[in-house]
Image (tube, grey):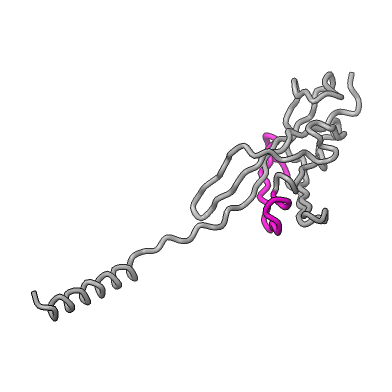
Amino acid sequence: MSTKNLLSLSLSLLFLLHIAASTATTRPALKPVSVAVEGVVYCQNCQKIGTWSLTGAKPISGAKVSVICKNHNNQVNFYKVYETNKDGYFYAELVGYKMNHPVLDHPLQACKVKPVYSPLSDCNLLTNLNDGLVGAPLRYEKKLVVGPNYRAAVFAAGPLAFHPEKCL
C-alpha cells in the first residue's frame, strides 16, 4: 500500500472516529458528592429518664432537629432545621455546606445535631441522649447513597430524644 493511500485511510478513520464520538450520547456528569446526615428522634420511656437507654422509647413524627456546622475559626457556616418523618427518621442533606479547610471543616469535626422541637405536648423536654444538649457528634458509617446524578456521603447522628415532663 502506498504512503498516499495509507495517509488517506488514516485520515478517513480519524474523521469517522470524530463523527462517532460527537454523535454518541454523553452521560450527564455526576453531581459532586453531597453531604447528608441521618438519624431518629424518640420519646424516651419515663423509666429510662436520666439514662441513655431507648428501651420502650417511641419515635416522634414531626420532631425538628438542627444541624450546626462551624468552620475552623469556630464561626457558624451552616445551620438548618430538618423535620422527622412518620417513623421519627430525618435525612438532612447539607445543601450549601462548604469545606474551606479539608480537615478542620470536615463534617465529622465541624457539624453537630441538636433536637429542637417535639410536637408532642406530653413529651417535649430535651434529653442529653448522645450529647443532644450540646450537639450530637456525627459518625461515619461508610454509607454512600447513589442515584441518577446524585451521590451523597451519609453521616449518622444520635439517636436523639425528648422525655415527658410528668411520669406516673
Nearer to us in this view, 90 or 5: 5
Q: Residue furthest front?
A: 3
The residue nearer to you, when weighing 152 against 147, is 152
Q: Position of residue 9 (x, y in %)?
A: 17, 75
Residue 10 in sight here: yes
Hey, which quadrant is residue 40 in on the image? top right
Q: Please identify the dominant SS of the magenta region.
A: loop
- Is residue 97 something one can see in this rendering? no
Based on the picture, tell me whether residue 62 belongs to the magenta stretch: no
Q: Is residue 168 above or below residue 66?
A: above
Apparent side of residue 21 relative to residue 40 in the rendered image (left or right): left
Residue that sits furthest to the bottom in the current view? 4
Q: Name the residue furthest right.
A: 166
Question: Where residue 129 sits: x, y (%)?
Answer: 80, 31
Determine whether, in the image, residue 96 is placed left or right of residue 32.
Answer: right
Which quadrant holds residue 113?
Answer: top right
Quadrant placement of the C terminus = top right
Q: Residue 5, how many percent across, how many down?
A: 12, 78
User: What residue do we see at 81% from left, 35% from top?
Assistant: 131
Please identify the residue farthest to the left as the structure is shown. Answer: 1
Residue 1 at what x, y percent from top left? 8, 74
Which stretch is magenta?
83-106
Q: Residue at x 27, y 69 (%)?
A: 17
Would residue 105 be counted in the magenta stretch? Answer: yes
